[in-house]
Amino acid sequence: MSLFSFVKDAGKKLLGFGDDEAPEAAAAEAAPAPRPVPISAGTLHAMLASHDLAPSDLSIAYDEGTVTVSGTVDSIADREKIVIALGNVQGVESVDERLVLANALPDPVLYTVVSGDTLSGIAKDQYGDAMKYPTIFEANRPMLEHPDKIYPGQVLRIPPLDD
């Protein structure tokens, strides 16, 4: 959950909100301009739905330039797309993101190597199986070039095992 800041006057005009008047020369011939639609939770929700970015439990609130969005998303990419889409609307100054990942994996463990450690020893300690060391090695590439080349003080990412 994070608060993201945007430039309030530098976004896409949503449903005519903030559109400039037609030039005077063309105004006489042009049909009356549609009335601008002010930003509201409903217009923001409609915009996200039009981009297939609205999960079924999406909740949006809008108050004086701040959008608060919550719901359940399938991926981090969906979360980021929603935040960016909302933040790039003219008149939105910040997005208070409270989205939850549907199938969130546990956070990886960070492990600091001590003298005498090996990847297989760390795998045995963390996973209960020394032969799972390739999982740790792959999670730390390209920082690690070879499974035998780790050093004390080095911090390694220990990802959760896929079941």
Image (cartoon, rainbow, N blue to C red):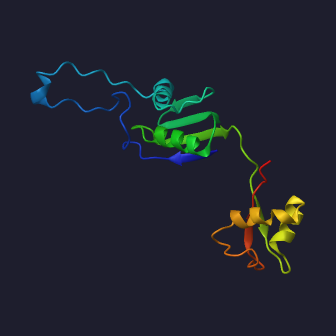
Q: Position of residue 120 (x, y in %)?
A: 84, 70
The residue that appears at 28% across and 21% down in the rendered structure is: 34
Q: Position of residue 3 (x, y in %)?
A: 57, 46
Which quarter of the figure has residue 11?
top left
Which quarter of the figure has residue 60?
top right
Q: Position of residue 80 (x, y in %)?
A: 55, 44
Against 148, residue 70 (above or below) is above
Q: Is 29 on the left-hand or right-hand side of 78? A: left
Q: Nearer the viewer, residue 69 or 63?
A: 69
Against 82, residue 5 (above or below) is below
Q: Is 93 on the left-hand or right-hand side of 110? A: left
Against 153, residue 21 (above or below) is above
Q: Is 32 on the left-hand or right-hand side of 142? A: left
Question: Residue most toward the front?
Answer: 131
Q: How many marks?
A: 0
Can you say which quadrant of the picture contains the N terminus?
top right
The residue that appears at 69% across and 66% down in the rendered structure is: 140
The residue that appears at 80% across and 66% down in the rendered structure is: 133
The residue that appears at 53% across and 39% down in the rendered structure is: 82
Q: Nearer the viewer, residue 69 or 156?
A: 156
Question: Residue most toward the top?
Answer: 31
Q: Is 48 on the left-hand or right-hand side of 57? A: left
Q: Position of residue 118 (x, y in %)?
A: 82, 75
